[in-house]
Image (cartoon, grey):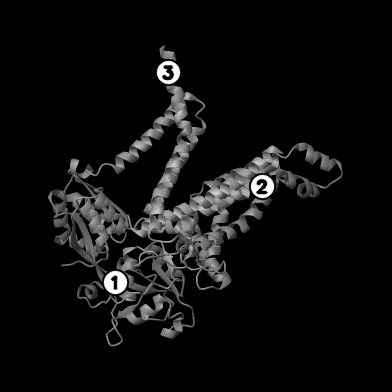
Amino acid sequence: MRKSIAPRAVLSLNGALSLIGTLLRVSARPLISALSLICTLALIGGALAVSSTPAFAQQKAKALQIKGSDTMVNLGQAWAEAFSKSHPGVNIAVTGGGSGTGFSALINGTCDIAESSRAIEAKEIAQAEAKGVKPNQETVALDGIAIVVNLKNPVKNLTIDQLREIFMGNIVNWKTIGGANKPIVILSREFNSGTHIFFKEHVLRRGIAKGPEEFSPAALMMPSSQAIADEIAGNENAVGYYGMGYISPRQKVIAVAKDAKSPFIEPTIEAVKSSLYPISRPLYIYTNGKPQGIIKEFMDFVYSKEGQEIVKKIDFVPIK
Amino acid sequence: MSPRKIKEFVIEKLIFLSGIASIVFVVLIFVFLLKEGISLFKNHGLGDFLGGKLWYPVSDPPKLGILPLILGSLLVTAGAIAIAVPLGIAAAFYIAEIVHPKVRDLLKSCVEILSAIPSVVLGFIGMVTIVPFIKKFFGIPTGLTALTGSIMLAFMALPTIISISEDAINSVPREYKEGALALGATHWQTLHRVIIHGALPGIIAAAMLGIGRVFGETMAVMMVTGNAAVIPRTLLQPVRTLTATIAAEMGEAVRGSDHYYALFAIGIVLFVISFIINITADLFLHRGKRR
């Protein structure tokens, strides 16, 4: 359900348009028509105001806009809640939408803090510099990517090479890797989810970001991590991946080995922290330049003992 | 000018502005789509875009072929129409011609309620009920298929098809029906030999508007069709639709990248197809009125 930000915006736009439509239909009566026009203008005005106030945060120093990665939206929310308790009067808004959304908001000046599950791209840095924004990267937590299958699936361990063959569509039946004689259904996150890109670069391409390997075209692209979790719970043919925050007793977690000679490791906090678990990644916060003022206070809080405790509570891995 | 005249003038202009607002919106939306979408074709050929079989938008270089997406959209729409049109027309005949007037009101309000259910809710219901059912019933590896999407979309197209068909049936002149009955035709003969001919343009328009509704639907489809960008061969395969692609990827597309422009170009494709569907529906509606 976390990916629903963009569609929700579409829905509300539809709502606004149909409202205008309804109002227009009765515009034979002058008073109502005048009202409808005012509504219309107010809507347009509102939209313009939202899109053209990059300086919003600066004017009201006590408001923080946090935006970005869907993976991190719960984490950001938890930090914001705890931070507001010790800083009453600070107003923090946390929204998801994806790492890319966070970067474009930071570049356009519509957010103060961008959460991201991937590093900023060269193209985005260039865009930022063109607008006088200097993206500053801070690593705030770690995340292990869990490989999950249905509880009825007998497969327990997989190597990175086996995962690679499965997700590229070269291994198509579970019996090849010690399971039942059933077809493999691949579940993936959408193309530009930070998790999808990380998995592609570090599992399919073995760390070579520009490699030629791709997900099998037959892979199902699920709109959210929760959708993957639900489909895995109900489908014994399925295999999928998501951030370890989504691990629950309804799915079976596969132990992963770097290669055939290495031990099989399950994604636990200790294993990710000590880099034993082979598929883990840093989670970032980006700000415009070195954090200052209230943003610095927030970052200090994130790095504090309490802030890192929260990381653990949301099922990510603290950096300290 | 007297205050009355000024008031008159202001109100008149306000009404005029309200009246042309929707035209302005349509034009602005189209211009914006065109402006953003055209940028794609600086680096990519139109043929590669419309006919390409691979959709890997975030690779380097990106592969931006939307043929699987177009076929996915068409397949899901065709499936939905195959389910919704016969069902909708039969329901319209039942409501307009056969059922007791008291039950008719109840049925009509139920149809209206069906159209008021948000597509997200329908998608969610489909995900937890129809997806597992399809998987079990057909014994296929996953229930996230084009057929599942078609069934959900059929639910969404039904209210449109039923209400407009029913209007068309009701607007067939009473004399036709009375004449047929007076000549000794049975009720069924009257329905399928006389009334259906009178109502046909309206019914076709209803089907076209239903198609339009289905083709543009996003949320429910994205939740139940699996979104795999492969060229579909059967209804029992996962598909990725044009609308779901935009909704799923726009949030994270790097602004100004080819991927971003490609999503707008998909928007143009959708716009053009919906436009054709609406024009066709309009043609049939007007043909019906002229008779």
Three-letter amino acid code at the position of disc 1: Ala
Q: Which residue is mark 3?
A: B7
Furthest-right residue in this view: B184
SS assignment at label 2: helix
What is the CA distance from the residue labelled 1 to the residue labelled 2?
54 Å
| Residue at x-position 31% and y-position 64% | A194
Residues at badges 1 and 2 in contact (C-beta under 8 Å)? no
**Residue B122 at least partly seen:** yes
Q: Which mark is residue B203?
A: 2
Q: Is residue B133 above or below residue B208?
A: below
What is the CA distance from the residue labelled 2 to the residue labelled 3?
46 Å
Picture quadrant where residue B244 is located: bottom left
SS assignment at label 1: loop
Q: Chain of mark 1?
A: A
| Discs 1 and 2 share one subunit | no
Give the mark toward the camera: 3 or 1: 1
| Residue at x-position 23% and y-position 42% | A56
Rendering coords of residue B195 (x, y %) = 75, 45
Residues at badges 2 and 3 in contact (C-beta under 8 Å)? no
Q: Chain of mark 2?
A: B
Q: Quadrant of the N terminus of chain B?
A: top left
**What number of labels is visible?**
3
| Residue at x-position 57% and y-position 44% | B112
Work out whether mark 2 precedes mark 3 in sequence or the reverse, and give the earlier one. Answer: 3
Q: Which residue is mark 1?
A: A209
Rendering coords of residue A169 (x, y %) = 43, 77
Q: Quadrant of the C terminus of chain B?
A: top right
Left or right for A298, reference A277: left
